[in-house]
Image (cartoon, rainbow, N blue to C red):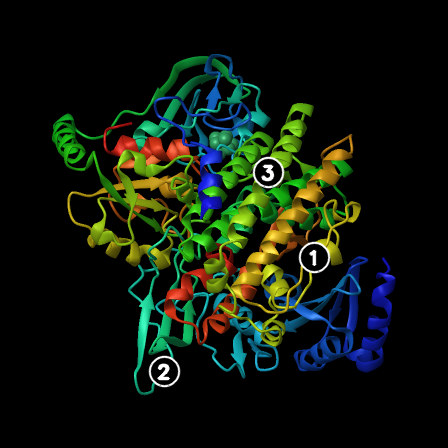
Amino acid sequence: MNALPELQPILASLTERFGAQIQPMQIPRPNEVYFQGKMELVPGFCALLYKEWGARLASLFADDARAQTGDFHLYYVFALDAAHGFLILRVPVPPSQPRFVSLTNALPALNWQEREIQDLFGLKLEGHPNARPCALHDDWPAVHPLRKDFALRTVLPPFAGERHKFRVVEGEGVFQVPVGPVHAGIIEPGHFLFSVAGESVLYLQIRLFYTHKGTEKLFENLPLAHGVALAESISGDSAFAHATAFCHAIERAAGVEAPPRARAMRSICLELERIYNHIGDIGAIATDVAFVVANAHAMRLKEQVLRLNEQLAGNRLLRGLAAPGGVRSDWNTAQVEALRQRVAWLRPEFESLVALIRESSSTRDRLETTGILRPETARDLGIVGLAGRASGFAHDLRRDFPHAAYADVTFTVPVFQEGDVLRRLQVRVDEVRQSFSIIEQLTSALPSGAIRASLPVLPPDVVALGYVEGWRGEIFHWIRTAPDGRLARCKIKDPSLQNWPALSEAIQDNIIPDFPVINKSFNLSYSGTDR
Amino acid sequence: MFDILYHSLATGVVTTDYPKTPAQTSRQSRGRPEIDAPNWKDARAAVAACPTGALSCTDGPETRRVTLDLGKCTFCGFCAEADPAIRMSNVCELAARHKAELTTTIQYQLAPDGTHQALLSPPRAAADPRPAALDAVGAQLKARIAKVLGRSLHIREVDAGSCNGCEVEIAGLNSPVYDLERFGLHFVASPRHADMLLVTGPVSRNMELALRKTYEAMPAPRLVVAVGACGCSGGIFGTNYASLGGVDKVIPVDVYVPGCPPNPYALLHGILTAIDRG
Ligand code: SF4
């Protein structure tokens, strides 16, 4: 297959620079091009793509392919937003020398992803500024769960208590405030260690992976048909987005596209997921600055979206509708009508909620200039999704890599430069309005016909990258197939994994009492990160 | 200020008066699967389709025992898609005090080709395995707890490893639509103030200690409610190197609330069951 025309000049420049040092491997899809090259090449490859072509590293992960090729493989996935394509560099790591070179000093965005590979695959990091365990906590025995010779059901000795040594922050009047893993609110577990001088936060250390539950390993042990149910449980508030990214990967591996009606239904559900989460977050941000009336109205609206979800998918969190090849069940006219009416009802209700918040000057005071993530920092950390867009780093897979039915609708992607809590709120407000419009465009011309394409049984060792722009940001599912309709690997990339470090940056020089609202303005998924 | 007041007055009361009026779920909502046991021809297709192992069967020489465990079931409906003898109902209030009450077994006489020849025993909830005397003590204790805690209860929520789906619904209990506080129920920030622990799972290896410590920090008498398929049984994650399974693997559980996630009615029903107001 030929690569997209927009990718051709980039491929030519790579060939010119690296010649025979990189081997073009395969182009399974026009926007997904694979190369293979040695470890030494990676920094130069990255530098060329970043500097000359504005690439960003969307994902870095490993795969144990010792049984197939004798090696571990590292995959560096570059997104070229302007060229609408992904370039993927595969780097073999021989088991005799299980190590790889860190790029974190040049690309801080890779920090956690590199450490996760070290933990889960036992490939030793070289030159990383902080190569301590990340995905597996410090008390874990020396196991590497994503190696093929590690069994899913291995029984490990019980957790013996936290032994993590946090970095020491010293100075006159500096003290430390530990929070978590069990928090005061109804939220997921994680540990935050604030180093504080007076009221201001000097440094925030975040320790996650408390909810690590072996999800990626479990994918390798389930029949493909059950994978969708598991994908729905990666991050509960993004159940539909994750399940759809998973289905997208399978469809791309099979070379099958979901029928138009299914694609429209997917986009509608992705937007409903965006709407209910954004409205919930708008309310929660209001709560955290003590404007509880606004939250009550937001919760009321969110409930109406959840009830609509139930009518459309049989489940309030849109579980059970996604399916490889399309969607599982069709909507009748009554359901489509309910959708149309609910959105028509929501529009003015949402506007009056927004007006309520906008007219509260004390709320604005608390949100403006609070928790600033500067555009340069957002770029360095590779921040994705709504948090990136509030800090001037704007990309959106719906626009740059149209999936589902996003090529058939018009919408704008809101961008702000200030990067404070107020702008992250404003991005949400603007996005909800766009979501209403997207749903209206799709329902007014809902394609008829089939809702599910049939999929062939996949041969082993087919690789494919599935992607979806979830409400937090881009979600990737990369798969490699195994014999008998199973998976040899399913790498899940939730936007949260990429965005957590932004929180440490945004909280600096703010006061601890503002932490809840700053944290909420990102609202990152712990489970999506920890898996 | 006036705007805020006007907005709220114009909205009016939106709170349900559940449980006085029954749960309002839509027709499309998927709850407990209903099995047409007398007319079920072959359990194997549905069992193979079930992603969580909620539906399972074991074959003897000429008989088959089919088990449906609502503690594992995510109400995904795959079984109903695979087999016309199964239908998804929208029944969601399924909380139980004993895990065994969540399990139904059916027995069939098998034909040589593995299909069902005759129904040997109709759907039956598994018997409570504990001796009756213990049960009486338990009932007394429960009555006392209900008396002490029944009118005003403080709840501490702990996510012991969930996907956050259950949290979305639990947080919704505070919305004006469900308004937990009208029952005298109240979420608190510390286990030291709590009478009830509402725990979602599966319990991850990394959260085991934190869950245990949270439980130990509570004053007695204390109640534990396990929420969701993962909290009840480990759900689709089951037990693996990083997951210990259901909440009762780590601390004693008083009430199990099935669902994936349980909707707000199911959650309210579960919490009220724990204090005998269900
Ligand atoms: S509804 Fe889903 S989880 Fe429940 S028994 Fe049927 S297939 Fe299994």
Query: Does the rendering let one see residue A223?
Result: no
| Residue at screen point 74% across, 48% down | A406
Residue A346: numbered disc: 3
Q: Is residue A427 above or below residue A197?
A: above
Q: Are marks 3 and 2 in contact (CB under 8 Å)?
A: no
Q: Is residue A11 left or right of residue A46?
A: right
Local packing at callout 1 (Cα closer than 10 Å; few below 14, some 14-19, many 20+) is some
**Residues at marks 3 and 2, common chain?**
yes
Tell me how many marks there are: 3
Measure the C-alpha gap from mark 3 to mark 2: 49 Å
* Camera-side mark, 3 or 1: 3
Q: Residue A169's mark?
A: 2
Marked residue chain, label 3: A
Q: Is residue A458 left or right of residue A357?
A: right
- Amino acid at the residue labelled 3: Leu
Query: Subunit of mark 2?
Result: A
Q: Residue A531: percent from the left, percent from the top?
A: 49, 56
- Under circle 1, the secondary element is loop
Q: Earlier in the sequence, mark 3 or mark 1?
A: 3
The quadrant holding residue B272 is top left
Whether residue A130 is visible to the viewer of this picture, yes or no, is yes
**Mark number displayed over residue A413:** 1
- Looking at the rendered image, the quarter that the N terminus of chain A falls into is bottom right
Left/right placement of residue A239 relative to residue B168 reads right
The answer for how far apart the CA atoms under marks 3 and 1 are is 21 Å
At x 54% / y 65%, what residue is drawn? A499
